Amino acid sequence: MKKILFALFTLASAVLFASDSRSEIAKKLYGRIKIVNGSDDYPDYKVRIVPYGSYQEDLRVKIVDSTPSRTGEWQIVDEGWHFEIRFVTEGEDISICFVQDYPGLTP
């Protein structure tokens, strides 16, 4: 009986404290985005940019000027952000591709 209770407790803990999956992050990662670059910064998410058409992305991103209203729409800001991200080349939480070219947004 103790083994069963321990197993149930362990399973419940794993479910409650599990980190978001890539698809869950992709669903909620939209809005006002601040990009941080320093190694001392602790972003909400580490993001890797992959080439458009490579089919390796978890999320396709479109940069917009107005307030983003749906998944994949980002407005790049310095203040009043919803999420902070850092571009990385490995160890990412999520991979993205831009649906338009934005030369200034590279790792």
Image (tube, rainbow, N blue to C red):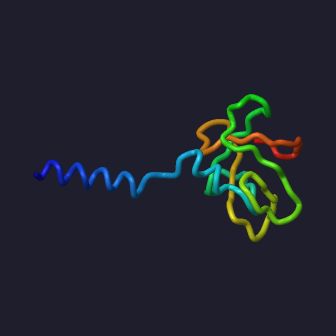
| Image quadrant in which the C terminus is located | top right
Lateral position of residue 42 relative to residue 18, left or right: right
Q: Residue furthest top?
A: 54
- Find residue 41 and report its image quarter: bottom right
Front residue of 36 and 63: 63
Front residue of 87 and 98: 98
Q: How many numbered markers are drawn?
A: 0
Q: Is residue 22 visible?
A: yes
> Where residue 62 sits: x, y (%)?
82, 49
Residue at the (68%, 32%) spot, across then down:
56
Lateral position of residue 55 relative to residue 10, left or right: right
Front residue of 21 and 105: 21
Q: Residue furthest left?
A: 1
Residue at the (69%, 50%) spot, across then down:
86
> Where residue 97 sits: x, y (%)?
76, 40
Q: Is residue 33 visible?
A: no
Residue at the (89%, 61%) spot, across then down:
65
Looking at the picture, does residue 73 appear above or below residue 22?
A: below
- Find residue 76 and report its image quarter: bottom right
Lateral position of residue 61 relative to residue 9, left or right: right
- Find residue 9 and report its image quarter: bottom left
> Where residue 27 sits: x, y (%)?
64, 53
Residue at the (58%, 45%) spot, across then down:
22
Q: Residue furthest bottom?
A: 80
Looking at the picture, does residue 36 appear above or below residue 94?
A: below
> Where residue 78 sits: x, y (%)?
79, 64
